[in-house]
C-alpha cells in the first residue's frame, strides 16, 4: 500500500512540474490560471501522497535466512552389529524382579565365518524368579522368544542366534551366585521358515519353543 501511494505521489509531482514548465500539449488543454491551479493542486496532493507512502512502507530489510540443520537421530547406531545390539537392549530393558540386576547381561554380535554379510548373535540375560519353577521357566522361554523375534525381524542377515538365561542359584553349601538355567539356539535354516507375521503370543508360546534347539535346561525345570 505504501509503495502504491508513493508511486501516485511521484506521478502527481511530475504532472505538477510539467504544468509549471508549460509544455505545448498542456498549453492547449488548459488556460493560464487553470493550469496554475491544477499544478499547485496536484503538486500538493502528490507531495502528501508521497510522504504518506514513505511513512507506511514497511521495512524491507530481509532478515538473514538460516537453514535448519539436518536432524540426525540421536543414539541410532549405523553399523549392523551396533543396530542388532541396540535392538536386543530394547527387548531386555529394566531389572529383574528379585535381585534387581540388569536384565541384559551381555550381547555379542560377530560376522559369520561362513556367510558373507551374515551375523552370529549371542545373548545372555538375567531371568525373573516366579511363584513356581513352571512359571519361572515360562518367563525364561518368553524372553528367549522375544530376543529371537527381535533379531530375526531386524532386517539384518542373522545366521545363528543363541540366547542364555541366568538365575540366582544356591549350591549345597548355601552359597548363591548367578548360574545358567536355560539356553536355546535358532539358526537361519529354521528361522527362514517361520511365519514372523503371526501375533507375538503365538510365536512365543507355540511356534518358537517347538523350533529352536534347546541346548540346556536346568533339571529343576524338567
Image (spheres, rainbow, N blue to C red):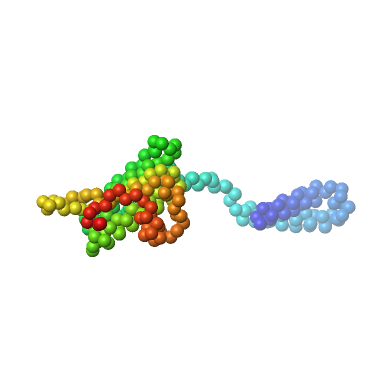
* Residue drawn at 62 percent across, 53 percent down: 57
Q: Is residue 79 visible?
A: no
User: x, y (%) of residue 66?
Assistant: 52, 45
- Res 77 → quadrant: top left
Q: Is residue 36 visible?
A: yes
Name the image quarter holding the N terminus. Answer: bottom right
User: x, y (%) of residue 129?
Assistant: 24, 58
* Residue drawn at 40 percent across, 60 percent down: 202
Q: In this rendered view, identify the residue nearer to me: 21 or 197.
A: 197
From the viewer's perspective, tell me whether residue 45 is left or right of residue 89. Answer: right
How many labels were placed on the picture? Answer: 0
From the viewer's perspective, tell me whether residue 112 is left or right of residue 69. Answer: left
* Residue drawn at 36 percent across, 60 percent down: 205
As drawn, the residue found furthest toward the left would be 173
Q: In this rendered view, identify the residue nearer to me: 192 or 91.
A: 192
Name the image quarter holding the C terminus. Answer: bottom left
From the viewer's perspective, tell me whether residue 29 is left or right of residue 47. Answer: right
* Residue drawn at 83 percent across, 49 percent down: 22
As drawn, the residue found furthest toward the right would be 28
From the viewer's perspective, tell me whether residue 68 is left or right of residue 76. Answer: right
User: x, y (%) of residue 65?
Assistant: 54, 46
User: x, y (%) of residue 127?
Assistant: 27, 54
Amino acid at each position: 500500500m505504501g509503495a502504491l501511494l508513493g508511486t501516485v505521489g511521484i506521478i502527481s509531482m511530475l504532472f505538477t512540474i510539467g504544468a509549471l514548465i508549460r509544455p505545448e500539449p498542456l498549453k492547449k488543454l488548459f488556460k493560464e490560471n487553470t493550469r496554475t491551479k491544477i499544478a499547485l493542486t496536484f503538486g500538493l496532493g502528490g507531495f502528501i501522497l508521497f510522504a504518506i507512502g514513505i511513512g507506511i512502507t514497511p521495512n524491507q530489510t530481509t532478515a538473514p535466512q538460516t537453514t535448519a540443520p539436518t536432524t540426525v537421530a540421536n543414539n541410532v547406531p549405523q553399523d549392523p552389529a551396533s543396530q542388532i545390539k541396540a535392538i536386543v537392549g530394547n527387548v531386555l530393558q529394566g531389572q529383574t524382579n528379585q535381585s534387581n540386576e540388569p536384565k541384559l547381561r551381555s550381547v555379542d554380535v560377530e560376522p559369520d565365518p561362513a556367510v558373507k554379510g551374515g551375523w552370529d548373535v549371542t545373548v545372555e540375560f538375567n531371568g525373573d524368579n516366579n511363584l513356581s519353577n513352571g512359571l519361572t521357566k515360562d518367563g525364561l522361554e518368553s524372553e528367549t522368544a522375544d530376543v529371537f523375534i527381535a533379531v530375526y525381524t531386524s532386517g539384518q542377515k542373522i545366521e545363528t542366534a543363541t540366547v542364555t538365561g541366568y538365575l540366582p542359584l544356591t549350591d549345597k553349601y548355601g552359597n548363591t551366585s548367578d548360574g545358567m538355567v536355560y539356553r536355546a539356539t535358532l539358526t537361519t535354516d529354521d528361522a527362514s521358515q517361520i511365519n514372523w507375521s503371526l501375533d507375538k503370543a503365538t510365536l512365543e508360546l507355540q511356534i518358537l519353543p517347538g523350533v529352536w534347539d534347546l541346548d540346556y535346561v536346568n533339571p529343576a525345570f524338567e
